Image (cartoon, helix red, strand yellow):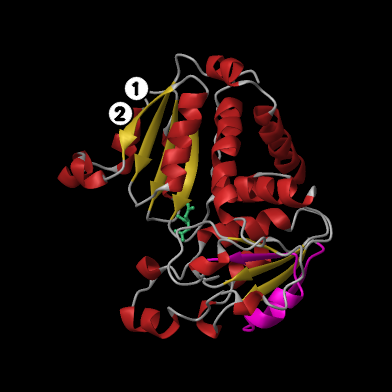
Amino acid sequence: MKRDLISIEDLSEKHLRDYLELGKRVEGTSPEVCRKVLAGRILGVLFYEPSTRTRLSFEAAMLRMGGQVIGFSEALNTSVAKGESLADTIHTVEQYCDAIVIRHPREGAARLAAEVSRVPVINAGDGANQHPTQTLLDLYTLQNLFGRVDGLRIALVGDLKYSRTVHSLFHALARFKDVRFRFVSPETLKMPEYVIEASEGATTEVIETTSLEEAISDSDVVYMTRIQRERFPDPVEYEKVKDAYRLDRAALQNAPAHLKVLHPLPRVNEIATEVDSTPHAAYFPQAGYGMTMRQGILAHLLGGKL
Ligand code: NCD
């Protein structure tokens, strides 16, 4: 059967731990050997929404595994502008490549692409729904920073309503042992019930609060998010919450020494640049782990031997 990566909900705890192992294997493999793993294979990269890290790290990952890349980062320059359907675009691109990475503003678009495609499809973000490869790299980052994922106390901060990164991440972390959550958001941007319900049955402790201060003194990880302006139906509502949280050096004064700050990036105002040089900042190394993890993901889905 064809392998896709569409939603964290499709992955068991075992799958998640296997992906972490795969990341380690990539790191333990020399660049020369990596370059043979996907030699001669072509990745199609279809981005209908802006991206820096996800697209470039996928492309770099494919090149480092010896493969090549085709695609677009602006759908308006493609036949989409002439009215072509997503299914027709997929049926075309699958003729040219061995796997497809897709980012799309509509929830469910990646699932649809996977249903019509005969080559593996990877979801690089569908609307406010899911961003599974970001979650795998986030888990890999935690594993590298703490030597484990189990037992961590994690605060998810900011736009918990529209951030697909935290929807995926919560699903994944709830599968690990004894992870405790603090959801920190303005009232209007709380974690949606449907996300919490999907993880029901997991032995998960969740505290919901609006206080970032409390989360900083009582967590191992503070995972910041950008307020997702493009997902707000009403710009007036965005204006009300856009500066809800700002993490600066003063805010970190009571932080435990081992506290790490993560962020999928891009940041707007939610983390002051003065935080970058503190030992708490881990968001740029996190972006770096993205390439390693995606090398592993591509090798796995394309059947490359690592
Ligand atoms: C995130 C995304 O696109 O969901 N970015 C990323 O992939 N690293 C987060 C965001 O845009 O805020």
Disc 1 under 8 Å from ligand 1? The reply is no
Going 47% across and 45% down the picture, which residue do you hit? 124
Give the residue number, with chain letter if any, for mark 2.
92
Query: Is residue 206 at least partly visible in the picture?
Result: yes
Coordinates of residue 81 in the picture (x, y in percent): 18, 46
Query: Which residues, given as a range, are shown in magenta?
Result: 203-225
Compared with 198, 1 (above or below) is above
Amino acid at dot 2: Thr
Q: Which residue is at the front of the view, 98 or 266?
A: 266
Compared with 124, 195 (above or below) is below
Query: Is residue 119 at least partly visible in the picture?
Result: no
Q: For the residue carrying disc 1, how many other residues have a C-alpha within 10 Å: few (<14), some (14-19), or many (20+)?
A: few
Compared with 43, 236 (above or below) is below
Q: Is mark 2 on a helix, strand or loop?
A: helix
Check contact, mark 2 vs mark 1: CB within 8 A.
yes
Give the residue number, with chain letter if any, for mark 1.
95
Amino acid at dot 1: Gln
Going 62% across and 56% down the picture, which residue do you hit? 282
Coordinates of residue 193 in the picture (x, y in percent): 61, 72
- Give the quarter of the image for residue 105: bottom left
The stretch drawn in magenta includes residue 106 = no
Distance (Cα) linking label 2 and label 1 = 6 Å
Q: Which residue is at the front of the view, 143 or 281?
A: 281
Coordinates of residue 136 in the picture (x, y in percent): 63, 45
